[in-house]
Image: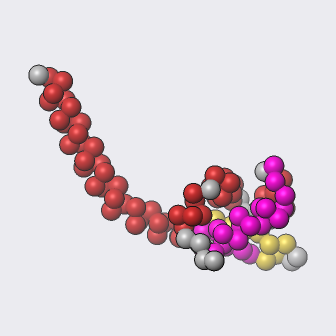
């Protein structure tokens, strides 16, 4: 089952993993040490993040280090930007209306 980026970031553990590896690349074992779960459970979260291309593996000897894929997150942010502008416009209009009502 292919996951999408919304499913990936909906889970708090996966968001926490993204936060950790945005700071530095980590192995699955290093990630598992940060959470109260098994290495296998962390691997399932890693699989979802990797399927969505939010993280990238890099082999170093026998270890696999996972890196945050900022390019993929930027694509997502660019997509969200179109909605963000609309929300900001609507909130500004609401603020203006509330200020007008408050003044009366």
Percent x, y of residue 91:
27, 43
Who's the residue at 57% across and 57% down the image?
Answer: 10
Q: Residue 27, relative to residue 56: is it above or below? A: above
**For the view shown, which residue lies furthest in the left direction?**
104
Determine the residue positioned at 84% across, 58% down: 38
Within the magenta stretch, is there residue 51? Answer: yes
Q: How many marks?
A: 0
Q: Position of residue 59 (x, y in %)?
A: 79, 77
Residue 24 visible in the current orientation = yes
Residue interval drawn in magenta? 36-58
Up-down: is 52 above or below 14? below
* 28 or 101, nearer to the observer: 101
**Drawn side of residue 50 relative to residue 104, left or right:** right
Examine the structure image and report whether residue 41 is included in the region drawn in magenta. Answer: yes
In this rendering, position of residue 3 left or right of residue 94: right
Residue 45 position within the rendered picture, expressed as x and y whole percent measured from the top left: 71, 64
Residue occupying the point 63% across, 52% down: 12
């Amino acid at each position: 089952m292919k996951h999408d980026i919304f499913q990936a970031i909906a889970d708090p553990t996966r968001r926490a993993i993204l936060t950790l590896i945005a700071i530095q690349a980590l192995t699955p074992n290093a990630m598992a040490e940060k959470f109260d779960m098994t290495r296998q459970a962390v691997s399932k979260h890693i699989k979802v993040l990797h399927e969505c291309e939010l993280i990238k593996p890099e082999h170093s000897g026998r270890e696999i280090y996972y890196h945050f894929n900022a390019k993929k997150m930027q694509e997502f942010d660019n997509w969200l930007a179109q909605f963000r502008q609309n929300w900001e416009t609507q909130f500004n209009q609401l603020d203006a209306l509330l200020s007008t009502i408050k003044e009366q």
